[in-house]
Image (cartoon, helix red, strand yellow):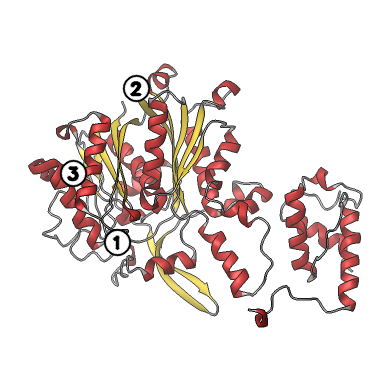
Amino acid sequence: MTTTFDRLIKILTKSYKLDPATVTPQLRLDEIGVDSLGVGLMLFDVEDEFQIKFERDPGPLQTLADVVVYIDQVMSEQQSAPVPNAVSKADT
Amino acid sequence: MRRVAVTGIGVVSPLGHSTAELFDNAQHGRSAIRLIASAFGDRRIESLAATVEFNAAEHFEPMSLRMMDRVSQFAALAARRALLDSQRGALVESEQERAGVFLGTGMGASQTLDDSYQSLYGKMSARVNPLTIIQGMHNAPAAWIAIEHHITGPTCTYSTACSSASVAIGEAWQKIACGQIDFAIAGGAEAPLSLGSLLAWSAMRAVANIDPSDPATSCKPFSRNRSGLVLGEGAALMVLEPYEWALARGAPIYGEVLGCGMTTDVSHIARPGIEAQAAALRAALKSAQLDMSEIDAVNAHGTGTQANDAVESAAIRQVFGPRAMRIPISATKAIHGHLLGAGGALECVLALLSMRHRVVLPTMHLLIPDPECDLDYVPNAARHNVEVRTTLSNSFAFGGSNAVLALRAGH
């Protein structure tokens, strides 16, 4: 079964040169080259991949493991409650 | 005032990725214009366009690529090629702050805007790509060039519609001539083939009808049956430096920028006027300290619209008098399309190559003479072994922003 970690690595390879064989959850984001702008892009891509919506500040994300924990938390929250749409057609 | 040499050229163009390929296609009149299809829901919309064959992933790191609109990719690659061509090598620290980037772009990051609209209004998603601002800002193409080559002097972006690149080159010339800087990468980049942009130009009724016999011949500057322009994409960047310095280092010298004339046509936002175009031609001559008798050729703005080509012909007649009939005028947009804010740069490059190779470039698809366009447009075939020492390169823009470059051949 594909894990959250595997899916995250797949996303990051869109923007960074990564060898999935050598990447570990303890790897720090800055070691890959993910800066603050890169974090914003990564979370944007994660929302697409996992069909979730980040609505609160994740706090400091330092390692890939931190990101996996954050994704899993938000997934579990949003699987038990409907994902709110930021803009619906009825709002316009 | 110092003389200013062009010592490097880089192109990413519908007619090729090297100056050799570009010039060979231009002198043989091979058109890059074709029909392209854009997806719109479950429909496909056909448009005429001159596109660049290009795989961006071969040239940029993945993260850079995600931050760059197509227009920035074109600009960065053309600048890289220009610098390599100049045999200048990397700038040392003391040179970096005496160097600048001067780039014209009319529509900037057209595809980024289109993608944002698609996401926001098409998909009704309030999630906007966090890189949208960086991709979309008008100064991004110039900034990428400065970053890559550590150019820490002025980095300026000019957006004067179809004259943007000529203005940029003129500004770079002036800064070097006056001694404010010693090195410039100057030119233009444009990537206007997003569906929104194609439809907007079409709605303005400025775009050529599709020639049913051959779409590649649809743009017909100065021909009586001309019906409009065809959009093209790409970039052309040049390395400019003081002439004496270029000579001293044994640099390849394509030619010189002698001056630039800029005027504003205040008669209408989009309809060209003879007086302001003629004034721009005169201003270029004055700036270059040339008499009109010294001009050997003109690279026309020559868009293929009814209005431009008749007005431009009249402006040239007004400035040159009876001599206008003896000056060869080339309109290369017939084959590479209208690169809008990059057009002036690609045409300046073609004018320099034309002088270097002693070939006067043809105006293709000119089959039916127009009494209003009665000058020598070099119809349909190049002329070889012609000595052309000086050329004016015209760019006349919506908004009335006119710019004419005066160029001299190298050795």
Q: Nearer the viewer, residue B106 or B342?
A: B106
Numbered-mark total: 3
The answer to the question of whether label 1 and label 2 lie on touching residues, with beta carbons closer than 8 A, is no
What's under tag 1, amino acid-wise?
Answer: Cys
Q: Which element is circle 2 on?
A: loop
- Residue matched to label 2: B1
Residue A49 is tagged as none
Q: Quadrant of the N terminus of chain B?
A: top left
User: Tag 1's secondary structure?
Assistant: loop
Depicted A3 relative to depicted B313: above or below:
below
Chain letter, disc 1 residue: B
Secondary structure beneath dot 3 equals: loop
- Contact? badges 3 and 2 (CB < 8 Å): no
Amino acid on which the number 3 mark rests in the picture: Pro
Q: CA distance from mark 1 to mark 2?
A: 40 Å
Disc 3: which residue: B328
Instruction: Kindly identify which chain the residue marked by label 2 belongs to.
Output: B
Above/below status of B196 relative to B253 = below
Work out whether disc 1 and disc 3 sit on a shared chain. yes
- Closest to the camera, between mark 3 and mark 2, is 2
Q: CA distance from mark 1 to mark 3?
A: 19 Å
Residue B137: percent from the left, percent from the top? 56, 51
Q: Residue at 88%, 50% (x, y): give it.
A: A63
Q: In the rendered structure, which disc, 1 or 2, sits on the residue that comes first in sequence?
A: 2
Residue shown at 14% from the left, 60% from the top: B370
